[in-house]
Image (spheres, rainbow, N blue to C red):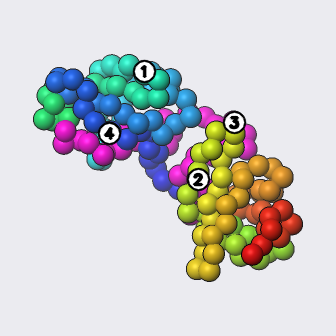
């Protein structure tokens, strides 16, 4: 398990005083208001202030006082320590913990590894890959029967039961 979790990515500067435009990687951007510090490129940095926009966040980090300093941080991720992350409700997981999990069906047939989580709005979709094929699995109880993050293993219903195979 990762010790740090990404909560946003710096996508651009905002203004000329080192403010940064953040693409949030969290379901609720209001969580940025509660953050006091973030880790950028392995360095812990204090947040001076934050402003929420529709789907973006503008933050000011202490020590980043010019557009030139802000430019150097473009594409970097804002991370928080796992112990400082929001507490998740039961049966919900951090994307970072799901990616890389091995997926088997309930007949113990290997399906592949979770390559990516696709956000669709109504429900997430697990993009599972192996050497031969790719499978998209809706992240819903009727398809995903068990998730064990500690052993990095996910059990799904056999694909043939719910999806036409080629």
* Residue span colored magenta: 71-100
> Rounded to the nearest whole Å, what is the CA distance between mark 4 and mark 1?
15 Å
Identify residue for label 1: 52
Q: Is residue 144 above or below residue 69?
A: below
> Rounded to the nearest whole Å, what is the CA distance between mark 2 and mark 3?
18 Å
Identify residue for label 4: 11
Q: Quadrant of residue 35?
A: top left
- Of the pair 69 and 39, the residue shown nearer to us: 69
Q: Position of residue 33 (x, y in %)?
A: 44, 21
Residue most extreme to the bottom = 132
> Rounded to the nearest whole Å, what is the CA distance between mark 3 and mark 4?
29 Å
Ranked by sequence position, the earlier of labels 1 and 2 is 1
Query: Answer yes or no: do the residues labelled 1 and 2 have beta carbons within 8 Å?
Result: no
Q: Is residue 108 above or below residue 29?
A: below
Q: Position of residue 156 (x, y in %)?
A: 78, 62
Identify residue for label 2: 117
Q: Residue at x 53, y 56 (%)?
A: 1
Ranked by sequence position, the earlier of labels 1 and 3 is 1
Ranked by sequence position, the earlier of labels 2 and 4 is 4
Identify residue for label 3: 89
């Amino acid at each position: 398990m990762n010790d740090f979790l990404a909560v946003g990515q710096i996508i651009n500067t905002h203004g000329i005083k080192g403010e940064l435009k953040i693409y949030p990687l969290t379901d609720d951007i209001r969580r940025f208001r509660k953050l006091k510090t973030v880790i950028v490129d392995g360095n812990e940095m204090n947040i001076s202030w934050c402003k929420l926009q529709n789907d973006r966040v503008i933050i000011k980090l202490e020590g980043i006082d010019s557009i030139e300093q802000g430019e150097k941080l473009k594409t970097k991720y804002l991370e928080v320590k796992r112990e400082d992350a929001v507490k998740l409700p039961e049966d919900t997981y951090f994307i970072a913990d799901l990616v890389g999990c091995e997926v088997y069906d309930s007949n113990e047939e290997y399906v592949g590894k979770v390559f990516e989580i696709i956000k669709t709005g109504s429900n997430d979709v697990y993009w599972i890959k192996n050497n031969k094929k790719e499978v998209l699995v809706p992240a819903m109880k009727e398809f995903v029967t068990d998730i064990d993050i500690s052993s990095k293993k996910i059990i799904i219903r056999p694909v043939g039961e719910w999806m036409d195979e080629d």
